[in-house]
Amino acid sequence: MFEIKHRNSTVGREVLGGVTTFMAMSYIIFVQVGLLGGKGAGMDDGGVLIALCLASGAASILMGLLANYPIALAPGMGENFFFALTMVPVMAAWGVGVGWQMALALTVLVGVLFLMLSVVGFRSYVLNAIPDALKSGIAAGIGLLIARVGLDNANLVPMFMGAKGASLAENQVAWVAMIGLAVTLGLLAARIRGA
Protein backbone atom coordinates (compact mmCIF):
# COMPACT_ATOMS: atom_id res chain seq x y z
CA MET A 1 0.00 0.00 0.00
CA PHE A 2 2.78 2.45 0.87
CA GLU A 3 5.14 1.28 -1.93
CA ILE A 4 8.05 1.10 0.51
CA LYS A 5 10.24 -1.10 -1.74
CA HIS A 6 9.34 0.96 -4.81
CA ARG A 7 10.63 4.05 -3.01
CA ASN A 8 13.94 2.33 -2.15
CA SER A 9 13.15 2.24 1.58
CA THR A 10 12.63 -0.39 4.25
CA VAL A 11 10.09 -0.84 7.03
CA GLY A 12 12.84 -0.26 9.61
CA ARG A 13 13.91 2.98 7.95
CA GLU A 14 10.30 4.19 7.83
CA VAL A 15 9.79 3.35 11.52
CA LEU A 16 13.01 5.20 12.39
CA GLY A 17 11.78 8.14 10.31
CA GLY A 18 8.47 8.12 12.16
CA VAL A 19 10.13 7.99 15.59
CA THR A 20 12.53 10.76 14.56
CA THR A 21 9.66 12.90 13.31
CA PHE A 22 7.74 12.36 16.54
CA MET A 23 10.77 13.27 18.66
CA ALA A 24 11.44 16.37 16.54
CA MET A 25 7.90 17.68 16.85
CA SER A 26 6.99 16.48 20.35
CA TYR A 27 8.12 19.82 21.81
CA ILE A 28 4.85 21.22 20.51
CA ILE A 29 2.98 19.24 23.18
CA PHE A 30 4.60 21.22 25.98
CA VAL A 31 4.77 24.57 24.19
CA GLN A 32 1.10 24.50 23.19
CA VAL A 33 -0.09 23.48 26.65
CA GLY A 34 1.97 26.31 28.13
CA LEU A 35 0.69 28.76 25.52
CA LEU A 36 -2.99 27.82 25.46
CA GLY A 37 -3.34 26.36 28.97
CA GLY A 38 -4.10 27.98 32.31
CA LYS A 39 -0.91 30.07 32.45
CA GLY A 40 -1.37 31.27 28.85
CA ALA A 41 -4.74 31.76 27.17
CA GLY A 42 -6.62 30.28 30.14
CA MET A 43 -7.82 26.99 28.65
CA ASP A 44 -7.80 23.73 30.63
CA ASP A 45 -4.30 22.18 30.46
CA GLY A 46 -5.58 18.61 30.21
CA GLY A 47 -8.12 19.54 27.54
CA VAL A 48 -5.44 21.27 25.45
CA LEU A 49 -3.11 18.28 25.80
CA ILE A 50 -5.75 15.71 24.79
CA ALA A 51 -7.11 17.82 21.90
CA LEU A 52 -3.59 18.49 20.58
CA CYS A 53 -2.54 14.83 20.70
CA LEU A 54 -5.79 13.50 19.21
CA ALA A 55 -5.91 16.10 16.43
CA SER A 56 -2.23 15.61 15.55
CA GLY A 57 -2.48 11.82 15.60
CA ALA A 58 -5.69 11.70 13.55
CA ALA A 59 -4.43 14.22 10.98
CA SER A 60 -1.08 12.43 10.58
CA ILE A 61 -2.74 9.01 10.20
CA LEU A 62 -5.22 10.36 7.65
CA MET A 63 -2.37 12.01 5.73
CA GLY A 64 -0.61 8.65 5.51
CA LEU A 65 -3.67 6.54 4.72
CA LEU A 66 -5.57 8.85 2.36
CA ALA A 67 -2.76 10.78 0.66
CA ASN A 68 0.02 8.17 1.10
CA TYR A 69 2.23 11.09 2.06
CA PRO A 70 4.77 10.75 4.92
CA ILE A 71 4.07 14.08 6.59
CA ALA A 72 3.22 14.54 10.26
CA LEU A 73 0.64 17.22 11.03
CA ALA A 74 -0.01 19.24 14.17
CA PRO A 75 -1.61 22.59 15.00
CA GLY A 76 0.43 25.49 13.65
CA MET A 77 2.61 27.38 16.09
CA GLY A 78 2.10 30.73 14.37
CA GLU A 79 -1.67 30.46 14.46
CA ASN A 80 -1.69 29.40 18.10
CA PHE A 81 0.59 32.27 19.11
CA PHE A 82 -1.74 34.64 17.23
CA PHE A 83 -4.72 33.05 18.99
CA ALA A 84 -3.23 33.25 22.49
CA LEU A 85 -1.40 36.58 22.27
CA THR A 86 -3.75 38.57 20.04
CA MET A 87 -7.25 37.13 19.71
CA VAL A 88 -7.83 36.13 23.34
CA PRO A 89 -6.71 39.49 24.81
CA VAL A 90 -8.76 41.41 22.21
CA MET A 91 -11.90 39.38 22.95
CA ALA A 92 -11.39 39.85 26.69
CA ALA A 93 -10.79 43.60 26.25
CA TRP A 94 -13.98 43.98 24.22
CA GLY A 95 -15.89 42.25 27.01
CA VAL A 96 -17.28 39.67 24.58
CA GLY A 97 -17.71 36.58 26.74
CA VAL A 98 -14.70 35.01 28.40
CA GLY A 99 -11.77 35.72 26.07
CA TRP A 100 -10.70 32.28 24.83
CA GLN A 101 -14.21 30.87 24.29
CA MET A 102 -15.22 33.66 21.91
CA ALA A 103 -11.81 33.60 20.20
CA LEU A 104 -12.24 29.85 19.66
CA ALA A 105 -15.73 30.33 18.23
CA LEU A 106 -14.38 32.97 15.84
CA THR A 107 -11.57 30.58 14.84
CA VAL A 108 -14.14 27.90 13.96
CA LEU A 109 -16.11 30.38 11.81
CA VAL A 110 -12.96 31.49 10.00
CA GLY A 111 -11.99 27.83 9.48
CA VAL A 112 -15.36 27.10 7.84
CA LEU A 113 -14.95 30.19 5.62
CA PHE A 114 -11.41 29.10 4.72
CA LEU A 115 -12.68 25.61 3.83
CA MET A 116 -15.36 27.09 1.56
CA LEU A 117 -12.78 29.31 -0.14
CA SER A 118 -10.57 26.25 -0.64
CA VAL A 119 -13.39 24.31 -2.30
CA VAL A 120 -14.00 27.05 -4.89
CA GLY A 121 -10.27 27.48 -5.57
CA PHE A 122 -9.85 31.00 -4.17
CA ARG A 123 -7.36 29.85 -1.54
CA SER A 124 -4.94 28.60 -4.21
CA TYR A 125 -5.25 31.91 -6.04
CA VAL A 126 -4.34 33.85 -2.90
CA LEU A 127 -1.43 31.53 -2.00
CA ASN A 128 -0.02 31.75 -5.53
CA ALA A 129 -0.20 35.56 -5.36
CA ILE A 130 2.11 35.69 -2.32
CA PRO A 131 5.75 36.14 -3.43
CA ASP A 132 8.13 33.28 -2.64
CA ALA A 133 10.39 35.65 -0.70
CA LEU A 134 7.52 36.51 1.64
CA LYS A 135 6.69 32.81 2.12
CA SER A 136 10.34 32.15 3.02
CA GLY A 137 10.33 35.15 5.37
CA ILE A 138 7.26 33.87 7.19
CA ALA A 139 8.86 30.43 7.62
CA ALA A 140 12.07 32.03 8.91
CA GLY A 141 10.11 34.26 11.29
CA ILE A 142 8.23 31.31 12.77
CA GLY A 143 11.55 29.45 13.10
CA LEU A 144 13.06 32.39 14.97
CA LEU A 145 9.99 32.57 17.22
CA ILE A 146 10.30 28.86 18.05
CA ALA A 147 14.04 29.31 18.71
CA ARG A 148 13.29 32.24 21.02
CA VAL A 149 10.70 30.21 22.94
CA GLY A 150 13.20 27.34 23.25
CA LEU A 151 15.99 29.63 24.47
CA ASP A 152 13.61 31.28 26.91
CA ASN A 153 12.33 27.96 28.30
CA ALA A 154 15.93 26.71 28.58
CA ASN A 155 16.72 29.73 30.77
CA LEU A 156 19.33 30.88 28.25
CA VAL A 157 17.78 34.23 27.27
CA PRO A 158 18.66 36.05 30.53
CA MET A 159 22.32 35.09 30.08
CA PHE A 160 22.38 36.26 26.46
CA MET A 161 20.66 39.49 27.45
CA GLY A 162 23.19 40.17 30.23
CA ALA A 163 20.70 39.98 33.10
CA LYS A 164 22.16 40.37 36.57
CA GLY A 165 22.35 37.17 38.57
CA ALA A 166 22.19 35.01 35.46
CA SER A 167 24.80 32.34 36.17
CA LEU A 168 25.34 29.28 34.01
CA ALA A 169 26.95 27.40 36.89
CA GLU A 170 23.65 27.20 38.82
CA ASN A 171 21.33 26.89 35.82
CA GLN A 172 20.55 23.16 35.50
CA VAL A 173 17.87 23.68 32.84
CA ALA A 174 20.34 25.55 30.63
CA TRP A 175 22.91 22.77 31.08
CA VAL A 176 20.43 20.10 30.00
CA ALA A 177 19.44 22.19 26.97
CA MET A 178 23.04 22.82 25.91
CA ILE A 179 24.04 19.16 26.38
CA GLY A 180 21.03 18.07 24.33
CA LEU A 181 21.93 20.56 21.61
CA ALA A 182 25.58 19.42 21.64
CA VAL A 183 24.54 15.76 21.31
CA THR A 184 22.20 16.62 18.43
CA LEU A 185 24.89 18.65 16.63
CA GLY A 186 27.42 15.84 17.17
CA LEU A 187 25.05 13.26 15.69
CA LEU A 188 24.36 15.55 12.74
CA ALA A 189 28.09 16.11 12.17
CA ALA A 190 28.65 12.33 12.25
CA ARG A 191 25.81 11.97 9.69
CA ILE A 192 23.89 9.54 11.93
CA ARG A 193 20.49 8.73 10.45
CA GLY A 194 17.68 10.26 12.46
CA ALA A 195 19.98 12.77 14.17
Image (cartoon, rainbow, N blue to C red):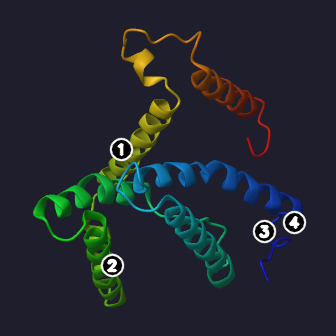
Which marked residue is nearer to the observer: mark 1 or mark 2? 2
- Is there CB contact under 8 Å for labels 2 and 3? no
Amino acid of disc 4: Val
Q: CA distance from mark 1 to mark 2?
A: 25 Å
- Is there CB contact under 8 Å for labels 1 and 2? no
- Residue sitting at x 83%, y 63%: 9
Q: Which residue is mark 4?
A: 11
Q: Which residue is mark 2?
A: 108
| Between 194 and 106, the one nearer to me in the picture | 106
**Numbered circle sitting on residue 38:** none
**Label 3 secondary element:** loop
Q: CA distance from mark 3 to mark 1?
A: 33 Å
- Residue 190, percent across and down? 78, 30
Which quadrant would residue 189 be assigned to in this image? top right
Which quadrant would residue 50 be assigned to in this image? bottom right
- Residue 151, percent across and down? 48, 30
Q: Which residue is mark 3?
A: 7
The mark that comes first in sequence, 3 or 1, is 3
Mark 2 burial class by Cα count in 10 Å: few <14, some 14-19, many 20+: few
Q: CA distance from mark 2 to mark 4?
A: 38 Å
**Numbered circle sitting on residue 141:** 1
Which quadrant would residue 102 be assigned to in this image? bottom left
Amino acid of disc 2: Val
- Residue sitting at x 45%, y 12%: 166
Q: CA distance from mark 2 to mark 3?
A: 38 Å
| Between 104 and 136, the one nearer to me in the picture | 104
- Residue sitting at x 19%, y 61%: 92
Which marked residue is nearer to the observer: mark 3 or mark 1? 1
- Residue 143, percent across and down? 44, 43
Amino acid of disc 1: Gly
Up/down of 82 relative to 57, above or below: above
Which marked residue is nearer to the observer: mark 2 or mark 3? 2
